[in-house]
Image (tube, grey):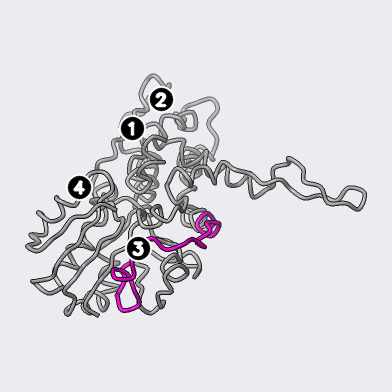
Amino acid sequence: MSRLVVIGNGFDLAHGLHTKYSDFMKYLCSYEKQPQIIYNRFVLLDSVSAQDQERHHFYEAISKYIPEEDLWSSFEEALGFLDYEQIQEDNSCYFLDYGDDNWRDSANHDFQYMISEDLSFAANISRYFSEWILRINTNVPPVVSPDVLNRNCLFLNFNYTDTLEKVYDIPTSNILYIHGNALRGNNLILGHHNAALFQEQIIPAFNAAEEHGIYLEDIEEDFRLQEAKEIIKDYFRKTYKDTASIIRYYQSFFNSLKTVNEVYILGHSLSEIDFDYFAEIRRNVLPTCKWCISYHEDSANAQNLISRLNIKNSQLFHF
């Protein structure tokens, strides 16, 4: 196939789909009226189900130590903005001095356990993202011309929806869902792209000093603090999008781009997180390949991509 079409979230938004991160927040905060039988009749009551409560708990947990203004505008990047100092501070009451009158054996682990509990939401990010995506109705009319997007194209899809298949009748065999597809029950991939958060010693020791009534001789070496830092680093590891590993896993797809002479990028923000994928595309397509890159309001990201990848043949268009 001579044309590769790269699909980003702006593609779904252009079709009127509610796929913004702020829409994900609304889903987490929503609840459904529960049907109950009263005198052999079904009625809808304003009661909150266990599933609703779980969603609300996830929302509260994920927004407790990550700034909401970042979380619901740039969700993936925001996962790397966890306030790891505050989470240790808030659990300082569980970090007891060994001579404290309230000392008990469990105090060897309480501090670490509470931090682990506060970060347990990370294991459920993909689950709630999938549940939300599955509720999005993709039964919408097409907005892109068949001259651009058709069954003769190859697709690299960053979205989790089935818009290409349902709206444009694109064969599944033509599409690589690089981060998973909700309808196929995939474990969706999303995350920050700052490996330094778990590879380097950038997490400072908790300041468990005199203000907390703790008088350890060498507090930085206390095993509880070391374990707590490892728990926090493990959070950053779990929420990391390892683009290098993903590219290696799908290397055969990228290798198949040797005959591609046109790349269309539709609705992708071209953020730093996904830059490696575009660099890999650039390495494999024909040197004379034409890049047609869409932008919504500002073309700065597109211009930056063209410059960084040294693309010689390009065209920008508003989408």
Pair 1/4: label in front: 4
- Residue 302 location in percent, x, y? 19, 52
Q: CA distance from mark 3 to mark 2?
A: 64 Å
User: In this picture, is 43 found above or below 144?
Assistant: above
30 on left or right of 162: right
Q: CA distance from mark 2 to mark 4?
A: 54 Å
Q: Amino acid at mark 4?
A: Ser
Q: Which mark is residue 144?
A: 3
How would you rate the neighbour count of disc 1 (Cα within 10 Å): few for under 14, some for 14-19, many for 20 or more? some
Region of the chain picked out in magenta, as a range: 131-156
Q: Amino acid at mark 1?
A: Ile
Residue assigned mark 1: 219
Residue assigned mark 2: 214
Q: CA distance from mark 1 to mark 4?
A: 51 Å
Of residue 270 and residue 130, the one placed in the foreground of this image is: 270
Secondary structure beneath dot 1 equals helix
Main secondary structure found in the magenta portion: loop
Q: Which mark is residue 299?
A: 4
Q: Which mark is residue 247?
A: none
Pointer 2 with pointer 1, Cβ within 8 A: yes
Is 208 colored magenta in this rendering?
Answer: no
Q: The N terminus appears in which quarter of the rendering?
A: bottom left
